[in-house]
Image (cartoon, rainbow, N blue to C red):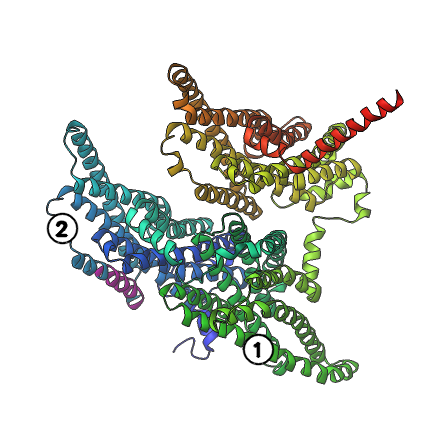
């Protein structure tokens, strides 16, 4: 007799997946709490990387497929690899995200979903491993038998091989479920391991062939080299980059699989989550390496971008002067509200996922909306600011910025509209058929709906790249209108239901009817959702109307300022939504107040006796170390003196660094790579003076006054410190490398170091430091160690580059003295710039080394320090650097100094001084 015969479909699924799920191993759902934080962090990382993997790999496949000149065997194999990476971003990573979130929320994942994730994982990674082996063998044949290469390796044979690889992987993976045998999975893993070893062995042989060819080329340097062999050698080197990074990212997950199949046991499944996430990151890295190392693909991508920037409309850069002020104003508004959107929505998400009693269906949909709004603050608003400022400065915006902004905008706002519609439908069902509500609306179904919403919008947005952008965009915008109309209609019906049943609920309350209380709660939730929907429609309708009128109806807009203001108003909604959730949802508000209560205590608790402070309040503040408030009286004087110093220097740091940034931004002649990096350093110093030093002053004064500092102040100070100083250290390292390149490759300097590349590096520095700082919230000291390790590495590289620069300067100064000076004028300028940078680096190194040494020894090496006064003085010395840096820039960089002295305000002051002196002389003459 079948033991599950009397069970419902959902119960059957639960019983199957809880006991066994075909050949899948036991996921140990009873130990989910041990990996709750890891699940959340890795899900966020994959959520950020998945869209990039989809877009970037689709771009590589699209370029190779559309360009006949790229249909070589090696490029076709790269296209197969990009296709598997595309599916990883489109299918595997979203499945991983839903898997981990379901595990966190439900402490269970249905068997069907586990099968989908496992199937897609094995197919995609099996194809990747086999394709990588095929690429390696193809390169080996090209070098070993280069005269017969075109005869042996043809395009048709490669296409047949690619199809065979996909069929083989799908067959092997499917047979595992048909025969329900774990042996087939072990054979599959063993095959992948053999492919990896074969790839590694092939590249060792390729390495020896390359060395032999290099020796031959060097020994016959008087003879012209064979172009074909040189090209094949270059291709082999390019493939080696892909293989090395692929092996680095994927060998951890393969070793873990082999260990588990060999009968090993893991005490903690966190290692599986991290190794899988590292393997998934490779899908985002591969297309970057392809474009970097493969000149043909890079040229095709650049040509496509420079021609039309894919499906995007003409932004009319020739009319930028008419929207200059609008661009600037909307950029400032978006820049101000972006951190608010990220922080507020992160708090809502954090509270919902941390509190089990908040994981009801309506709150899960609100969490989906908050996740979308957080992505708007992380990606859409920063890319909007970059778009508008680039448009103002250069009258041009790079295609990749436009693609990031447009793609993220359509994905996030599509998800917002559909999620809002789902929330309205959920509330309508709760009111109309409230007795069957729990049977119809379950957590699993809502999570499935959320996953479908994200996949649908990502797919529709990516389909715009396929050349059918008008059709797809029309479908996309039509769905938005339908969702908005449906949400509005449902809210009108909900309002009618609320009014109709209001009197009934009052009568039932007097009769102590329990159903009345439940129904009243549903009505209150419906009213709260109505506020969110109403404000959402009010703020998002303008951008929807403008976009549809201009891009679908092809109407003519008198000015594109309509876009700027409509988009900015729509982006503001991401900052308002979390506040409305807190205002209208009592449960979320209570949970947030409970969270804030661990940070900010009441005034009564602040004035309690010192022993109770030491025993209760320093119990913990996320990942921050114990500040030992019970010993604060030993550092009263140091706290007071350092707080006074920072309060005095903070306004000067803000004003002086703002002046540097303003001058560099406004003066086009100062837009050199070195000055742009100095501007990045000044921006981080502005934030030091604007955020970090005031929070330090508040920290020390609160510590002196109450013997305690609220967690919110400590978190603000710590987060600002790690972001700003991480950017400073890495920018300083970049400045040192830029100066070394200018001296070593001065003839190719302008070709290697361009403004666009510098801006990309600057954006990457900020992104890396913000990501690493926020990852410290995962209660994992690993990220703090990585962050501090990057600081030390950056400082060592900066010192090493300066040590390398000094001999070059001395050598070239001797050459300049011996040769004609006019011939070396450009060289002299680069040397002078290098000396200027060396001055900044020297001052920075002297002022920042103490706090770096103290932080590493105390927080990473876990060594005791005699007094926390060391922290106070070391941090204050570091903050002084933010006030010293602009002075060093003015002292050493003549061009910046000249521009500042040429400002109108100085001329007016000089004129006023001259007039005052004249009047004094006139008064002196009359008195005589």
Q: Is residue 755 above or below residue 473?
A: above
Compare residues 32 and 845 and report the one nearer the observer.
845
Left or right of residue 158: residue 582: right
* Magenta region includes residue 381: no
Image coords of residue 92 (percent x, y): 40, 60
Q: Identify the magenta region.
A: 164-178
Image coords of residue 838 (percent x, y): 51, 25
Mark 1 or mark 2, which is nearer the start of the sequence? 2
* Magenta region includes residue 166: yes
Q: Residue at x 71, y 64 (%)?
A: 583
Mark 2 vs mark 1, CA separation in Å: 60 Å
The dominant secondary structure in magenta is helix
Compare residues 867 and 61 and report the one nearer the observer.
61
The residue labelled by disc 2 is 150
Quadrant for the N terminus in the image: bottom left
Compare residues 502 and 667 and report the one nearer the observer.
667
The residue labelled by disc 1 is 485
Q: Would residue 256 be visible to someone looking at this image?
A: no
Q: Is residue 150 above or below residue 407?
A: above
Residue farthest to the right, as pictured: 927
């Amino acid at each position: 007799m079948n033991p599950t015969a009397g069970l419902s479909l959902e119960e059957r699924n639960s019983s199957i997946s809880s006991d066994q799920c075909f050949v899948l191993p036991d996921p140990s759902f009873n130990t989910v709490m041990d990996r709750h934080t890891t699940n959340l962090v890795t899900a966020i990382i994959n959520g950020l990387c998945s869209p990039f993997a989809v877009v970037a790999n689709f771009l590589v496949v699209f370029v190779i497929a559309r360009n006949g000149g790229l249909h070589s065997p090696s490029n076709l194999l790269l296209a197969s690899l990009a296709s598997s990476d595309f599916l990883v971003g489109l299918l595997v990573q979203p499945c991983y995200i839903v898997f981990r979130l379901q595990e966190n929320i439900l402490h269970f994942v249905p068997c069907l979903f586990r099968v989908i994730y496992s199937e897609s994982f094995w197919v995609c990674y099996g194809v990747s491993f086999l394709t990588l082996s095929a690429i390696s063998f193809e390169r080996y044949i090209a070098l070993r038998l280069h005269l017969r290469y075109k005869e042996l390796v043809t395009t048709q044979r490669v296409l047949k091989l690619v199809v065979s690889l996909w069929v083989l992987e799908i067959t092997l993976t499917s047979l595992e479920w048909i025969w329900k045998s774990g042996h087939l999975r072990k054979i599959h893993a063993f095959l992948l391991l053999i492919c990896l070893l074969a790839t590694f062995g092939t590249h060792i042989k390729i390495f020896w062939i390359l060395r032999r060819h290099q020796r031959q080329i060097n020994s016959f340097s008087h003879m012209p080299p064979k172009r074909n062999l040189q090209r094949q050698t270059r291709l082999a080197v390019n493939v080696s980059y892909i293989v090395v990074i692929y092996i680095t990212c994927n060998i951890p997950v393969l070793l873990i699989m082999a260990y588990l199949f060999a009968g090993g046991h893991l005490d903690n499944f966190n290692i599986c989550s991290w190794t899988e996430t590292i393997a998934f990151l490779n899908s985002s890295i591969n297309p970057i390496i392809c474009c970097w190392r493969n000149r043909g693909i890079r040229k095709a991508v650049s040509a496509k971008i420079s021609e039309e920037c894919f499906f995007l409309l003409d932004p009319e850069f020739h009319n930028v002067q008419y929207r200059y002020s609008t661009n600037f104003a909307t950029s400032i508004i978006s820049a101000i509200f972006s951190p608010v959107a990220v922080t507020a929505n992160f708090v809502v998400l954090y509270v919902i996922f941390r509190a089990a009693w908040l994981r009801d269906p309506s709150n899960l949909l609100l969490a989906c909306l908050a996740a979308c709004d957080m992505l708007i603050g992380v990606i859409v608003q920063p890319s909007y600011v970059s778009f508008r400022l680039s448009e103002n400065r250069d009258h041009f915006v790079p295609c990749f910025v436009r693609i990031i902004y447009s793609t993220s905008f359509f994905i996030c706002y599509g998800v917002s509209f559909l999620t809002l519609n789902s929330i309205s439908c959920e509330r309508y069902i709760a009111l109309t058929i409230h007795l069957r509500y729990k049977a119809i609306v379950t957590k699993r179904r809502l999570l499935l709906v959320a996953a479908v919403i994200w996949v649908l919008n990502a797919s529709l947005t990516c389909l715009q790249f396929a050349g059918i952008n008008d059709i797809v965009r029309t479908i996309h915008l039509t769905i938005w209108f339908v969702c908005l109309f449906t949400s509005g209609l449902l809210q009108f019906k909900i309002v009618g239901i609320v009014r109709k049943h209001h009197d009934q609920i009052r009568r039932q309350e007097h009769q102590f009817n329990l159903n009345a209380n439940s129904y009243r709660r549903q009505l209150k939730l419906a009213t709260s959702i109505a506020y969110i929907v109403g404000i959402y429609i009010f703020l998002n309708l303008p951008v929807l109307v403008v976009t549809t009128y201009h891009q679908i109806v092809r109407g003519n807009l008198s000015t594109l300022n309509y876009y700027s203001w409509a988009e900015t108003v729509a982006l503001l909604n991401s900052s308002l939504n979390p506040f409305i959730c807190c205002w209208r949802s009592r449960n979320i508000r209570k949970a947030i107040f409970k969270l804030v209560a661990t940070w900010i205590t009441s005034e009564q608790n602040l004035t309690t006796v010192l022993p109770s402070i030491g025993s209760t309040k320093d119990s913990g503040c996320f990942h921050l170390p114990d500040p030992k408030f019970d010993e604060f009286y030993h550092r009263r004087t140091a706290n007071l003196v350092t707080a006074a110093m920072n309060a005095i220097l903070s306004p000067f740091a803000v004003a002086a660094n703002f002046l540097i940034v303003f001058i560099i931004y406004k003066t086009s002649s100062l837009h050199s790579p070195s000055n742009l990096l100095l501007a990045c350093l000044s921006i981080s110093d502005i934030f030091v003076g604007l955020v970090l030093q005031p929070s330090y002053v508040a920290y020390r004064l609160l510590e002196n006054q109450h013997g305690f500092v609220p967690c919110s102040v400590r978190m603000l100070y710590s987060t600002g410190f790690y972001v700003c100083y991480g950017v400073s250290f890495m920018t300083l390292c970049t400045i040192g490398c830029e100066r070394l390149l200018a001296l070593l490759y001065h003839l190719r300097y302008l070709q290697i170091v361009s403004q666009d590349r510098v801006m990309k590096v600057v954006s990457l520095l900020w992104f890396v430091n913000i990501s690493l700082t926020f990852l410290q919230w995962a209660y994992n000291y690993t990220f703090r160690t990585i962050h501090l390790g990057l600081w030390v590495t950056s400082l060592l590289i900066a010192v090493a580059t300066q040590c390398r620069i000094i001999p070059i300067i001395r050598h070239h100064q001797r050459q300049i003295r011996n040769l004609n000076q006019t011939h070396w004028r450009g060289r002299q300028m680069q040397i002078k710039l290098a000396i200027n940078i060396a001055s900044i680096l020297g001052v920075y190194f002297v002022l920042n080394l103490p706090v770096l040494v103290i932080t590493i020894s105390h927080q990473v090496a876990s060594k005791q320090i005699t007094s926390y006064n060391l922290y106070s003085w070391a941090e204050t010395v570091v903050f002084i650097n933010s006030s010293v840096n602009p002075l060093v820039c003015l002292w050493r960089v003549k061009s910046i100094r000249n521009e500042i002295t040429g400002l109108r305000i100085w001329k007016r002051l000089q004129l006023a001084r001259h007039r005052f002196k004249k009047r004094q002389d006139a008064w002196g003459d009359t008195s005589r």
